[in-house]
């Protein structure tokens, strides 16, 4: 009798979960953006609008900036796992911050349910046109000839651009000083004014300046060339072996989201990412659209977390 009762209970739970998934969503879904309005996060509005159409409920972006993305991410980590709160997570919130920050309010793995990878974006190594180098190898030679005298800028301590520069120091065998800024824009202004030697930043902001000749692109940091800067080699092609760095974005939910809802949200985002107009819009802005399964995104998150922990430790990066 007990085994029959257990079987019946499991069956009822399965039926209840399926019915819950069929009725989901029946109200708007909040999508937390853990950064200030503007920037690369704005690129995702068309995708979220399409997902809204697919699910039949609005997806409302809510900016919760602060602490390099930790504040907004923690808000989601502490929300109910009912499918009505999602997070646009990044390489910062789920790969770099857990090792770089002295105090973390959440566990990047245990406190979240991975839903789907959205896209990746390579960084580009950029210098002022007056810098006496035309290739990344020439820059490395220049840096080695002046150890400790060159610098690189970033949007701030612990940012992906900062860690890309630190990894470049390690892999290329150079010693550049990091100069943190409060955002990419002021760092870019100093680079164009000749007060910085190099930056490794996401493509969208420097793209127009590269096209206009105000900045010189040397190489991209991913394993593949960029569709919007196809003339630039990868660092690997330029002789810096083992260098493959891309910023990335994906959708997470709080831990404990039922697998039926995980599958529903994953399917909706994958469908939206397959729409030609959305793919073309994202590609034109420098993104490489990914998509995929929750399992793939979970494994990717863990691998990135492990990878950047080693870089952070080697560079002795600590954000208080």
Image (cartoon, grey):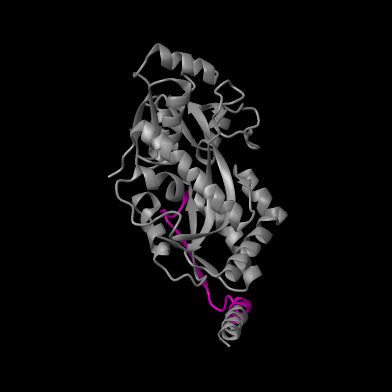
Residue 140 appears in the picture as rendered = yes
Task: Find residue 85 and report its horizontal and vertical position in percent.
Answer: 48, 67
Span highlighted in magenta in the image? 16-39
* Side of 140 relative to 23 (left or right): left
Residue 290 lies in the magenta-colored region: no
Q: Tell me which residue sits at (55%, 47%) in the image.
A: 300
Task: Find residue 194 and report its horizontal and vertical position in percent.
Answer: 40, 24
Nearest the eye: 22 or 85:
22
Nearest the eye: 263 or 66:
263
Up-down: is 191 above or below 297? above
Quadrant of res 54: bottom right
* Side of 227 relative to 64 (left or right): right
Q: Tell me which residue sits at (39%, 42%) in the image.
A: 183
Task: Find residue 231 and report its horizontal and vertical position in percent.
Answer: 65, 27
Residue 162 appears in the picture as rendered = no
Q: Tell me which residue sits at (63%, 53%) in the image.
A: 291
Quadrant of res 315: top left
Residue 24 lies in the magenta-colored region: yes
Up-down: is 214 above or below 84? above
């Amino acid at each position: 009798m007990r085994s029959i009762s257990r079987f019946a209970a499991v069956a009822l739970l399965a039926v209840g979960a399926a019915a819950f998934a069929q009725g989901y969503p029946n109200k708007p879904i909040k999508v937390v953006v853990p950064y200030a309005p503007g920037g690369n996060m704005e690129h995702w509005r068309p995708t979220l609008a399409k997902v809204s159409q697919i699910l039949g409920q609005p997806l409302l972006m809510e900016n919760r900036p602060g602490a390099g993305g930790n504040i907004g991410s923690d808000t989601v980590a502490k929300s109910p796992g009912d499918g009505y709160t999602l997070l646009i997570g990044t390489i910062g919130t789920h790969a770099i911050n857990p090792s770089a920050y002295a105090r973390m309010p959440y566990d990047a793995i245990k406190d979240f349910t991975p839903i789907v990878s959205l896209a990746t974006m390579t960084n580009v190594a950029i210098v002022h046109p007056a810098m006496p180098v035309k290739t990344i190898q020439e820059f490395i030679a220049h840096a080695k000839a002046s150890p400790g005298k060159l610098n690189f800028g970033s949007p701030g301590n612990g940012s992906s651009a900062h860690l890309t520069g630190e990894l470049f120091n390690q892999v290329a065998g150079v010693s550049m000083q990091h100069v943190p800024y409060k955002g990419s824009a002021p760092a870019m202004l100093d680079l164009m004014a000749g007060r910085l030697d190099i930056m490794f930043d996401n493509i969208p902001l420097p793209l127009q300046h590269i096209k206009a000749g105000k900045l010189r692109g040397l190489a991209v940091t991913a394993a593949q060339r960029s569709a919007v800067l196809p003339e630039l080699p990868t660092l690997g092609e330029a002789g810096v072996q083992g260098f493959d760095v891309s910023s990335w974005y994906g959708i997470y939910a709080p831990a404990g989201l039922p697998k039926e809802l995980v599958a529903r949200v994953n399917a909706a985002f994958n469908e939206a990412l397959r729409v030609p107009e959305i793919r073309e819009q994202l590609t034109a802005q420098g993104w490489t659209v990914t998509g995929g399964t929750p399992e793939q995104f979970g494994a990717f998150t863990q691998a990135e977390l492990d990878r950047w922990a080693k870089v952070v430790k080697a560079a002795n990066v600590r954000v208080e």
